[in-house]
Each structure stands twice: as C-alpha cells, then as structure tokens.
C-alpha cells in the first residue's frame, strides 16, 4: 500500500485491509510516521511521539475492529502509562509520567489500534484555538494562517492532513466539534456518561466534558463510539451499552425528522454570512430529503449560559493548579492567562459557583422543551469561518488590566465592590464570541455532532451542528450517514496536504 491509497481509506477500510492480510501493521505505522514527518514542520499537530511503544505493538497487533490502524490520542485527559500528560503546559510536562492508561487509551488498544503519539492542545484544554506556549501553535491544513480550532486542534489537523484516519479527543465546550468544523471533519460529542473519562477522573469539568474522536467518515465515528462506549468501575453517571450497537444504528433506515434551526448567536453577537449560509443550505438539503424544518430555538438566556460556562474554568483551573503544585509543579510555569483565570476563580465565592452550576438544569429544561417539539436542533458550529491566529484571544487591554489587577491584589477589591461578576460576564462574551453555539450541549449533557456540510467561497470548511436529546447518538449517526450519502465530503482534502 502506498500513501495515496492510505489517504483514500478510512479507519474501517484500513482495518479490513489489515484483516484480509493485504497490509501489515508495521507498514501502516510507517505510512503514518512518514506523513507526520512531512506535515509536522508546517502544522505541528503532535507534541509527543511514542514510536517505540507503537513499534512493539505492531509486532503482535491485537485482533479487533481497529486492528493495525495507526491512531493518535490527545495530550489532555488521555494518559498513557510511562509517558507524560502535559495538557499543553510546561509546568505539567515536568511532572512524573502516568502510571496507567486512561480507559479511552486502553479500549483503543484493545480494539487493535496502534497509538504512536499525543496531539497538541491549548494549556489545560481551555481554548477553542490550539496555541500552547509549551509546544507552539498548531496550524490549520486548509490555511496555515488560521487556527484548526481547539482544544482538540492537534487531533483535527492530524486527521485532516492524512496522518491518521481517526484521532481521539475530548469536548468540554466544543473541543471536538469546533476543530471538526474548522478542518472539514466529523466531530461527535457523546452524551454525558457514554464514555468513561477514568480512571484518573470521574466527571470531568463537573460532567460537562465528554470523550470522543475526530474522523473523516460517519462510519468511523460510529465504530469508535462502539469501541469506547460503556461503563467502567467507579463511573458516577455511566450509560449502558446500547443494543444494537452504534454501527448497526448508523445503518438503520431513518424516519423523516422534525428539525428546528437557528443561526443567530445566543450571545447576540454578529454571525458571519458564511455561517448563516451553512445552516440555510443544510436546511435546504434536509427539506430535499423529506425532513420538516422550522426556525426555532430554546427559550434561554445565552449570556447567562456563557456566564455559567465560564464558571467551569473558575472552579476547575485553580483546583488544577493547586493539584499541580502539590505534585511539585512550579505555578510560574503556567501561562499568564491560565494564572489569571485561577486568580479570578479564587476570588469567586462558593455561593457564586454553586449558583452558576445550578443554572444548568434550567438550560436542560429549555432544550428539552424544544426537543419535545423537534427531533433535532440545527445551528452553525462556529459563528465565523476558522479565524486567523490571534483573533480569538482576549482583547490585549483587557488582558493587561486583569493581569495587573491579579498581581497587585485588586481582584478582591473588585469582588467586594460587586464589579467582579460583570467583569466575568464580559470575559465570557469576549471569549465565546466566535464559538457561542457549542456549550449548550456540554452543560445539558446532550449529544451533538458537527458535520462538514459547507465550504466557504474561500475554500475553507465550516461545519454545522446538530443537537439531539440525551442518549440519542444513534439518531445523530443515522442522519449524519444520510447527509454524507446525499452530499459526500470524504473526497474533499486541503489542497496543500491532499
């Protein structure tokens, strides 16, 4: 098999070629490593290589649905025994390596996958762009001046550039769907409790974060979900394994659906014409396939949702820094923005944090009311095409003023004066302006998928998002398969990395 053939096959097909004896696991790994060597200088998708481990695994590849297929995991949450888990951070990279594989890593290996590296992510997986100081930014294969999204940006760039057909990631506020939309991929965020985040963690980010993969085909997404789904000992909110499995569900004929759609930002901020056009063209495609569509959206306050979402960071980041310091990390090794978020969190009361978390139930009720009338909810995945590097950062003046306030101890004064909450609301709006559509599914625990159904006039991918009721991944996969057949995307490759 040459690289051109490797590039034309998804993980399902590569596993079939391996099972038939037409290609070996060592040869597939060679192709993946050669491709990585070609694209790493321009894209920087991988921050930690594990070639020796992968070579050993290819000598006796395990039988399974991913047998022999080269894979990548994310350097955030995907611990690999005897290797560091840096989370995009110099401070965490210096800590001792993991002592056990994450369940996601173990299950991919048990399915026969050959894991040979970890993909780049912003520090602590906190942003919708991938630009860690520790490992450098990752570039979008469709335009290297632009972000591949985040926080699973390295994974998306690697899949889009043809290094691997499938890469694992996770999604705490859009971190699978955002890079999928930026890079022309399928990105499914499963329901809360569908895939275990253990053993090192229970419910990540108060349950908002979910494990998943980035792929180029719906059937690969279904296969990976089938491999990864299912409870592990100690899981707090585990869902049972469905029967039939997700692969069979994705192939099942789809009934005609009622789909609500909206392309207005829940923050009241502008939405790019291309993002609106992506939804409008998807609506037309759905109608042509016989589905009913209607403009509608959940009755909720989008700014309140963004405010509640930011409180995940305000609770989790200071706790993460405290844990790292207890393990011997130097807090000065974290990026200034991370330390600023930690300071804001430490200035936030437990009562304010609890109030923010309690609002999630109201958002879930609003979405459930919409789903009582419609099977699915369609939005843009992004409010604009993939942004140029630096565009999604907090405004420089705001960043400087906040960092100055942190260093001289003014955050406590802002808290006492009542100004801190307004400041947090402003940060929430600024940080989510380009990605305001994805957080709803995280706070409500519902499954959502970004599909590559639109390319801009400039040739950039721009995905659309479907949100389903809880535990309805099968419905999303069914529709995704139908849309993939009606408007194929697998053949669309970034010109410079085709």
Image (spheres, grey):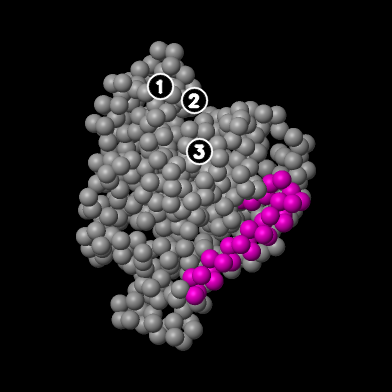
Tell me which segment is drawn in magenta. 351-380
From the image, state whether disc 2 or disc 3 is nearer to you: 3
Q: Residue at label 3?
A: 229
Q: CA distance from mark 1 to mark 3?
A: 18 Å
Q: Residue at x 55, y 36 (%)?
A: 241
Q: Quadrant of residue 296?
A: bottom right
Crowding around mark 1 (Cα neighbors within 10 Å: few <14, some 14 to 19, many 20+) is some
Q: In this orientation, does residue 5 appear?
A: yes
Magenta highlight on residue 290: no
Disc 2 from disc 3: Cα separation: 17 Å
**Residue shown at 44% from the left, 31% from the top:** 165
Whether the residues at callouts 2 and 3 have beta carbons within 8 Å, the answer is: no
- Along the viewing direction, whichever of 82 and 214 lies nearer the viewer: 82
Could you classify mark 2 by the number of other residues whose Cα lies within 10 Å: few (under 14), some (14-19), or many (20 or more)? many
Q: Earlier in the sequence, mark 1 or mark 3?
A: 1
Residue 236 x %, y %: 48, 51
């Amino acid at each position: 098999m040459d690289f051109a053939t490797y590039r034309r096959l998804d993980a399902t097909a590569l596993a079939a070629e391996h099972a038939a004896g037409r290609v070996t696991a060592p040869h597939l790994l060679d192709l993946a490593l050669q491709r990585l060597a070609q694209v790493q200088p321009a894209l920087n998708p991988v921050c930690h290589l594990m070639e020796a481990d992968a070579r050993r695994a290819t000598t006796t590849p395990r039988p399974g649905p991913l047998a022999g297929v080269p894979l990548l995991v994310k350097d955030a949450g995907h611990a690999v025994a005897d290797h560091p888990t840096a989370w995009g951070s110099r401070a965490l990279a210096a800590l001792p390596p993991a002592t056990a594989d994450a369940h996601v890593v173990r299950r991919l290996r048990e399915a026969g996958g050959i894991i040979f590296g970890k993909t780049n992510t912003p520090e602590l997986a906190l942003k919708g762009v991938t630009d860690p100081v520790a490992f450098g930014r990752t570039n979008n294969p469709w335009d290297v001046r632009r972000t591949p999204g985040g926080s699973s940006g390295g994974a998306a760039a690697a899949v889009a550039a043809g290094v691997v057909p499938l890469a694992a990631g996770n999604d705490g506020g859009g971190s699978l769907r955002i890079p999928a939309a930026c890079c022309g991929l399928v990105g499914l965020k499963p329901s809360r409790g569908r895939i275990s985040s253990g053993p090192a963690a229970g419910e990540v980010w108060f349950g908002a974060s979910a494990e998943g993969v980035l792929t180029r085909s719906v059937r690969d997404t279904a296969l990976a979900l089938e491999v990864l789904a299912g409870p592990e000992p100690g899981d707090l909110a585990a869902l049972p394994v469905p029967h039939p499995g997700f692969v069979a569900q994705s192939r099942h004929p789809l009934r005609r659906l009622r789909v609500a759609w909206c392309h207005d930002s829940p923050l009241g901020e502008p939405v790019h014409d291309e993002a609106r056009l992506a939804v409008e063209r998807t609506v037309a495609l759905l109608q042509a396939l016989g589905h009913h569509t209607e403009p509608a959206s959940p009755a909720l306050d989008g700014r309140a949702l963004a405010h509640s979402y930011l409180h995940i960071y305000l609770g989790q980041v200071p706790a993460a820094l405290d844990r790292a310091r207890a393990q011997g990390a130097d807090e000065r090794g974290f990026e200034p923005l991370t330390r600023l978020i930690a300071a804001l969190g430490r200035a936030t009361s437990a009562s304010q944090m609890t109030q923010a978390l309690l609002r999630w139930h109201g958002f879930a009720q609003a979405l459930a009311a919409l789903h009582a009338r419609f099977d699915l909810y369609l939005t843009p995945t992004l409010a604009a095409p993939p942004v140029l590097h630096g565009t999604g950062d907090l405004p420089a003046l705001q960043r400087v003023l906040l960092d100055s306030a942190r260093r001289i101890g003014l955050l406590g004064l802002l808290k006492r004066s009542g100004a801190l909450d307004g400041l947090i609301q402003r940060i929430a709006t600024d940080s989510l302006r380009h990605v305001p559509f994805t957080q709803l599914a995280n706070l409500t625990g519902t499954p959502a998928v970004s599909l590559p159904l639109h390319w801009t006039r400039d040739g950039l991918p721009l995905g659309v998002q479907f949100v389903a009721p809880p535990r309805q991944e099968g419905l999303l996969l069914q529709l995704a398969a139908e849309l993939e057949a009606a408007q194929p995307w697998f053949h669309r490759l970034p010109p410079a990395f085709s």
